[in-house]
Image (cartoon, helix red, strand yellow):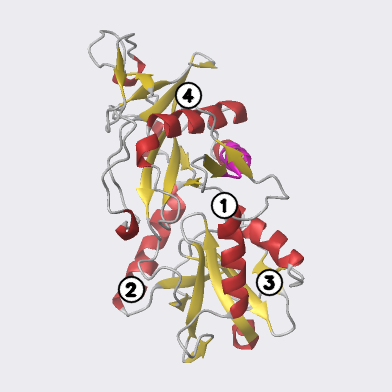
Amino acid sequence: MTIKYIRDEEPNLTPWESRDDEPINATDDRAGLDWDQLAFGYIKTDFNIRYTWRDGAWDGGVLTADETIPIHMAATCLHYGQQCFEGLKAFETANGDVTVFRVEENAKRMVRSCKKVLMEPPPEDMFIEAVYRVINANRRFVPPYGSGASLYIRPLMLGVGPQVGVKPSTEYLFTIFVLPVGPYFKEGFKPVDLVVEELIDRAAPLGVGDAKVGGNYAAGMRASLSAKQRGYTEVLYLDAKHKRFIDESGPANFFAITREGRYVTPKSTSILASITNDSLCILADEMGLRPERRPVAIEEIFSFQEAGCCGTAAVITPVGTITYRDREINYCPDGEPGPHCTALYRKLQAIQVGDAPDPHGWISKVPPA
């Protein structure tokens, strides 16, 4: 595989905009990593890709090995929160293809997030092209089929134009980096313990809770850190207005299986619309679990049969216990995930890695460079 390397020496251009026709060869050998022991954390890969919006248009994007972003100290992303990001995964199949899961939906969600904080959204076709380009530039970091790991893809949008007044930027950077990862929770597909958070709100109903902006995650760090210090894995948030209904877990959507055989997940204007959760609703319906997206009162946790968290990073994480005030409900008394969570997890994973049919057209094969 031959790619163009972006050098930093050309004058009058930011490093990621400098262009040089001198090709270098990216090795086809797979990176020498312990694929079975990967954590969910940053690992340096070969290249990232960057597009700049300036004077009303996007450029053609460039690949660079630079891990840093030179940025103006008055950039709107630093002062006024003009920033959003995405997360999706690529997988190697048994025949050696590399595929991505529902990339079109991530492109659409980034557009929605950008519009929410008044940024210029990357066109959906440019988003998908960028995903393919950066995967091809880092093919040796795609974890092998059967390892249980994946290539995590992190698109990022930043307002980089200098502004002192509170107003949108005149310049934006769209960049994507990738890294091989293992499970989000170190326990893997094992039950975790949640505690209901009542003193800290993650997001307000008419705010930006439904956008994938960094401020939502910063707002939840206090609650998450406090929960972990008390021996829990994560928090379960209630709605900010009434403190009666479940919103979501710290890093993921929440769902539950009722004793009547329904897949229930909260409907709220202050939670991020999860692509994984949407996929699980479809699979649950096919499995006869009759999905319901509705307000879920916190008291209902004591009548659920199973519960779980879901998202791109975690896929599905079964919930073992939920503590609410002075009461605890245990969904996994034997320490093992319930049958419905397990079946949903296996079915979704099989589709993602190409081991099961894809009747919904969720999988896109990455075309070779």
Give the mark nearest the N terminus, 3 or 4.
3
- Whether 122 is drawn above or below 225: the answer is above
User: Tag on residue 112?
Assistant: none
- Magenta stretch? 101-111
Kind of residue indicated by mark 2: Lys
Q: Nearer the viewer, mark 1 or mark 2?
A: 1
Closer-to-camera residue (272/352): 352
Residue type pointed to by label 4: Ala
Give me the C-alpha separation between circle 1 and circle 2.
31 Å
Q: Nearer the viewer, residue 324 or 311?
A: 311
Identify the residue under disc 1: 352
Sequence-earlier tag: 1 or 4: 1
| Residue underneath mark 2 | 228
Is residue 349 positioned above or below 327 on the image? Answer: above
Image quarter (top left, top right, bottom left or bottom right) of the N terminus? top left
* Residue on which the image places disc 3: 264
Q: Distance between the Cα atoms at labels 1 and 4?
A: 22 Å
Q: Is residue 107 in the magenta section? A: yes
Tell me what residue is drawn at x 47 percent, y 24 percent.
369
Relative to 331, does residue 2 appear above or below in the rendering?
above
Q: Is residue 368 left or right of residue 26?
A: right
Name the residue tied to disc 4.
369
Residue type pointed to by label 3: Val
